[in-house]
Image (cartoon, rainbow, N blue to C red):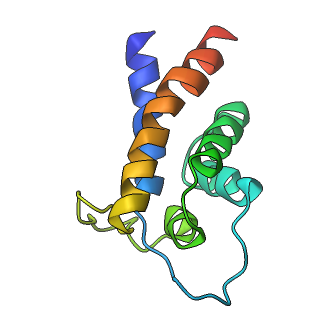
Amino acid sequence: MRICMIAAAFLVLPVLAACGSDSDTAPTVTQADIAKSLQDKGLDNAELANCAARIFVDQGISQAGLRALISDEYDTKAPDPETLGMSAEDADKARAASSRIAGECITGAVGSR
């Protein structure tokens, strides 16, 4: 069970490793957009994707940071591990979100099976 939780946490990490536009005219990224991106990138559990997306939004990541989360720029190359392709503040919030996801979403998704 612990391996399953760790593996699920690592499925969320590629989304953190993306970089997006910081344009003010870009459309607003919603929780649904993030959940869909997580699922498109291989997270098969819709409940887990929705929970993770909610936490990313709740952490207060900027729209530029959220656009970075759903971008595919770093799907084939490694981002800077310090910034994850985001501002330093958004990267810190994304790391905090990952910790919350591991505690709140993965435990709940595994426990409900």
Residue 32, image x, y percentages:
76, 54
Q: Is residue 72 left or right of residue 109?
A: left
Establish if 8 lies above or below 78: above
Establish if 51 lies above or below 29: above
Establish if 79 lies above or below 36: below
- Residue at left offset 39%, top offset 44%: 95
Establish if 105 lies above or below 50: above
Q: Is residue 44 left or right of residue 93?
A: right
Q: Quadrant of residue 112?
A: top right
Residue 7, image x, y percentages:
41, 29
Q: Looking at the picture, tell me which residue is in the foreground, 105 or 1.
A: 105
- Residue at left offset 63%, top offset 17%: 108
Q: Is residue 56 left or right of residue 81?
A: right
Residue 88, image x, y percentages:
33, 63
Residue 3, image x, y percentages:
38, 17
Q: Could one spot residue 11 in this view of the protein?
A: no
- Residue at left offset 55%, top offset 54%: 41
Q: Is residue 59 left or right of residue 74?
A: right
- Residue at left offset 62%, top offset 55%: 40
Give the position of the N terminus as an image quadrant.
top left
